[in-house]
Amino acid sequence: PERLISPYTALVRRSANPFEMAHVLVSWLIGAGYDAYVVVGCAKRDVCMAIRYRTICPEIPDENEKVEEPPPPEEEPRYKLVPLPDLTSKYVQDMENKEADKVQGEIDKVESERRRKIAELEKPPPDEMDGWRTHAWILVLPPFMGVEEPFFIEPSEGNGYPLDAEQYQHIESVYNNENYYVNVQKEPEEGQGLGALSYDLSDITCWEHLLAGEPFYRRQMVGIDTSDKRTATDTEKHLDMPCSWVEKLDISGDEYEQRYPGSHKVIHYKKVLLEKFSPYSQKDGIVKRVKIFDDYALSVPLITYEWYKQRGDKMLTVKIDHIKREIKEIFGIGRRDHLLKHVYSMDAPPTSVEGDRVMEFNYYPRIDHLTKLVCTPLIFEEHYTDRDDRLESRIIVYTEGTKSEPKRQVKDITETYSRNHDIPAKKDIWKKIFHIQDNTIELLYQYAYNFVTNDNRYEWYKQRGDKMLTVKIDHIKREIKEIFGIGRRDHLLKHVYSMDAPPTSVEGDRVMEFNYYPRIDHLTKLVCTPLIFEEHYTDRDDRLESRIIVYTEGTKSEPKRQVKDITETYSRNHDIPAKKDIWKKIFHIQDNTIELLYQYAYNFVTNDNRFFIKPNLAETGGKILFYPDKTSGYIADPTAQRPRNLDVYYALCENIDWEYQTTKHIRDRETDVNSYLRQRHRELREPSLYVALYDTERNEAAKKGWTEREIQRAEVTEREKEAEIDPLAPYLARMFGSGHGTGAQVSVKEATLVREQCINDFKAKQLARQNLVQERFDKYNAEYKAKRLWYLANQFILTPEKESAYFAASAELSFKVHALEVRLTRHRDLSGPRFRILIDYLDKHPLLKEYNKAACHGKVDRGRVFPFP
């Protein structure tokens, strides 16, 4: 350039050429303590003309996660596990490596070819003045301010470059405020760059000095007395530059904030548009924006980065991904909700959680220790850290809305808890799963040590038609336990069965408990195994307590299990002796025998028993014949008489019949249980929910009835409001009957009579009310005065109890007198206005139309004044 403006003027104008910008920058660097120089030389066209659209933007943030590897141990461990021997084939491994290298080589070849084509397309057009374009930049030399190697600084960017940077082609001279150095070195060979030059400015074979000597800090005082600097300087014959005539460079805080002309600067990089803003210049507080595009014309945006400062919502950065249609906001510390990060979709509703978004919080200052929120249209997740209740996460799953119910409904809620080592795993809940729509609850417990499955699971139900309340599923024992509420037709309360049991058969491990009180048979419990069937009863009239049936396994010819023994147990009947009170009946079906055991008598260690061998009814034609040799018994009391054969025969007949009834009952019971199991299987596959009678939202029949009653009640209320109360109705009914209509006119004489009766009754009622209040007022007032006189006469001789009783009675009488006085005054004040309202109503009554006309002509007296005494 022909002339240069001073650094101070450049700061005032905020615009300069490369030389002037280099002067400003080198002034700041020298003032900061650096050994900096302005370099005059030649550079490429893009650097000289500040063309950056072929340069990669240096301000694109690096979002690659840096994984910090743990440092290696300082000492080798004393004991180490011996590694397992490598049994893989080295030949096979070498072949696989060769194949992988071959594939990778082909990929690298394609990639290098692609990059070569891109570089060819991005190559700038030829420059006729290449190598002749003058430019100025900065050179920083060591060793001041920790600089170890010399490097360049581009003043138009402020970025540092190594000495062998390609954009700088030639150096003619360097200078600063102390001297001017001309480069007398040979041009470096092609490919070496400016890094091959020597930057030792004290070497006069490489750099010619404009001023003789070196700066003071470079001078070598050899054999010279340095105590007197002036003498030393004169002896060395050094020449120093005169002092600067430029005004002191000073940038205030306000000027620094408005450092961009117009508070806005735009830089066009390769597929990147960089915008910088002055602080407080934009309403949203943005200070920098980096927008990355897919094409060179900057028409297809990919990602946008934005930086903010001094925002009230503490937002620091925003990343907008136009491909994923996602926005990521980063916040600083200080928000009231302690939000740190907010990632959400552009398509998400701006003011609703029913969209894709992730919110991260600073959990430490939050009371609920919330760390993260994850929202999707049908899922809502909450994550916590270091909570006292050990809650780690809560996941809510929704169902989509329908036409009748457009708002989404909660389907499942899953809560996860951390391990509490103070209690065993079987009592430490890991997950709670609430199935809202199925009205069930599941509990999953923590995994115990050395177990691959957790202990058990509970489920809770509500509003189910089968009255099921809870289910416990034990995966270790492979057992399911169902609890039912009151109200089932079979009065079942509990059902425990094995997962391996047949779902619709009693031939499996299961236990069923019933509410015996409303059952006719008073059944309390059923216990089923593959070969045993037990019935337990409570408070039966026949004192039966239990019935146990033992089966034999099926065979090929008879695959169904067969009844082997039936044992019935009875409670004690104290109305009959123990020797006649049966304790157990044992029917050996396959052995064709019956065994009776009687109750233990008092002070006896053995009990009576009787054994029967049943006769073959097929041989006897269905008749029961008695054979004394086919029965035997034991009598515990040796002094007791032996039973008669007739009694024994009757007992045999009775028990044979009872065996038949019991066998039939067992088959019926098995059929009932199988029917129940089939029904239960259907209930589990197709569960139904019942609606409470007072559930106005779901019970349509009740809702319809309530709506109809509300409509009827509203109609009655409306009719009552519309019905006008007529004070003359009783008098008209008394004179003409209840059927007299309001449209029929009455004569003047009749109207006068009706009107006078109405007015006289009103006056009489008001006077009677006044007299009643006045009478009570006089009574209580006289009583109060008498009490007062009595107290004045006897106040010095009264006991404390009588005095307190007097004050209580006096206060009550005073309150009554005051209340009656207020009521009497109010009655007197309102009687006149009420009378005038009645007269006005009668003057406008349609039935008294003729009377009112006569009154207007003065023929009758209206009596408009209430004669209140």
Image (cartoon, grey):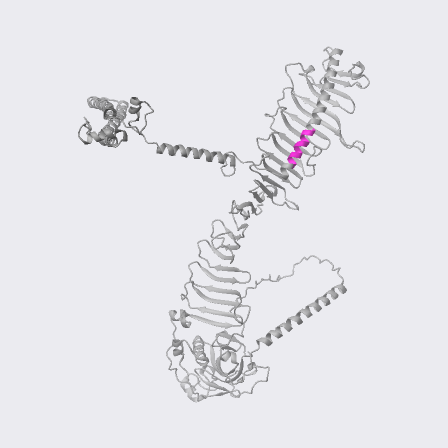
Q: Is residue 169 above or below residue 866?
A: below
Q: Is residue 3 above or below residue 341?
A: below
Q: Assign the magenta stretch its main secondary structure.
A: helix
Locate the C terminus and report the quarter of the image it occupies: top left
- The residue at the point 53 percent across, 52 percent down is 375
* Residue 412, horizontal then vertical, whole percent: 56, 45
Left or right relative to 633: residue 363: left
Quarter where residue 467 is shown = top right
Residue 738, magenta (yes or no): no
Q: From where the camera sits, is residue 827 visible?
A: no
Left or right relative to 404: residue 31: left
Q: From where the camera sits, is residue 656 visible?
A: yes
Quarter where residue 618 is shown = top right
Q: How many marks?
A: 0
Query: Going by the picture, which residue comes out furthest to the right?
Result: 619
Quarter where residue 617 is shown = top right
Query: Going by the picture, which residue comes out furthest to the left?
Result: 858
* Residue 405, horizontal then vertical, whole percent: 51, 45
Residue 674, magenta (yes or no): yes
Q: Nearer the viewer, residue 193 or 398?
A: 398
Locate the N terminus and report the quarter of the image it occupies: bottom left
* Residue 115, horizontal then vertical, whole percent: 62, 73
Q: Is residue 709 above or below residue 799?
A: below
* Residue 763, horizontal then vertical, whole percent: 23, 25
Q: Nearer the viewer, residue 425 or 488?
A: 488
Residue range of the region highlighted in magenta in the rendering: 670-681
Q: Nearer the viewer, residue 786 or 521?
A: 521
